[in-house]
Image (tube, helix red, strand yellow):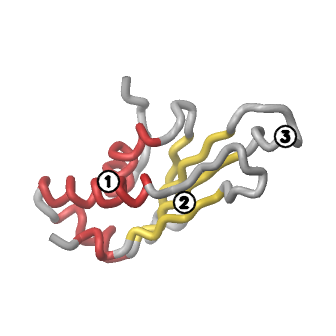
Amino acid sequence: MMRPIHLRHAVLYDVANCLIDLFPSGADVAEIGHESAPALFVSWRTGGVANHPGNIAWGVHYRFDAQVLRDYPHLPEAARDRVCERVRDMSRLLDFNYADPLASSLLVVDVDESVLAA
């Protein structure tokens, strides 16, 4: 079952729908930042007791280049699908090492104009 995603920006909405299954089912998806340069933020918390390595808040901040936000809506559907797949591929490389107390729990993905390449 698909979780409902409520985002105002069409690009963030499409990308979030493409990525959502990569994250835990309880993850929150939000649009953050200024309206002129919105970003996508996915966050969740792993279970465990306080002060234990398993009890960690995790987040992925997707920062979008202005050209991506500007050009994406004008692309044909097949090209928009390719952009989403490229961001999805970038997300597969993220390492969420829940067992490592020194793991980075905030990861940043810069979505630049290279995702627009045919």
Position of residue 115 measured from the top left corner of the image (x, y, whole percent): 28, 69
Residue drawn where x is 11% and y is 59% of the image: 76
Q: Quick one: SS at disc 2?
A: strand
Q: Earlier in the sequence, mark 1 or mark 3?
A: 1
Furthest residue in direction right, as rendered: 51
Q: Amino acid at mark 1?
A: Ala
Q: Which residue is mark 1?
A: 10
Position of residue 45 measured from the top left corner of the image (x, y, whole percent): 68, 39
Residue drawn where x is 84% and y is 40% of the image: 52
- Left-right relation of 116 to 92: left
Q: Which residue is mark 2?
A: 61
Q: Relative to 31, is 111 above or below?
A: below
Q: Which residue is mark 3?
A: 52
Q: Relative to 29, is 25 above or below?
A: above
Q: Estimate how packed mark 1 is, as few (under 14), some (14 to 19) or many (20 or more) residues with alpha carbons within 10 Å.
A: few
The Cα–Cα distance between marks 2 and 1, rounded to whole angstroms, is 17 Å
**How many numbered discs, if any?**
3
- Left-right relation of 108 to 87: right
Q: Amino acid at mark 3?
A: His
Q: Quick one: SS at disc 1?
A: helix
- Left-right relation of 86 to 61: left
Position of residue 60 measured from the top left corner of the image (x, y, whole percent): 55, 55
Q: Earlier in the sequence, mark 3 or mark 2?
A: 3
- Residues 79 and 30: in front is 79
| Quadrant where the image shows the C terminus | bottom left
The Cα–Cα distance between marks 3 and 2, rounded to whole angstroms, is 24 Å
Q: Amino acid at mark 2?
A: His
The Cα–Cα distance between marks 1 and 3, rounded to whole angstroms, is 38 Å
Q: Based on the displayed image, in which of its 4 quarters is residue 61 positioned?
A: bottom right
The answer to whether the residue labelled 1 contacts the one labelled 3, judged by CB atoms less than 8 Å apart, is: no
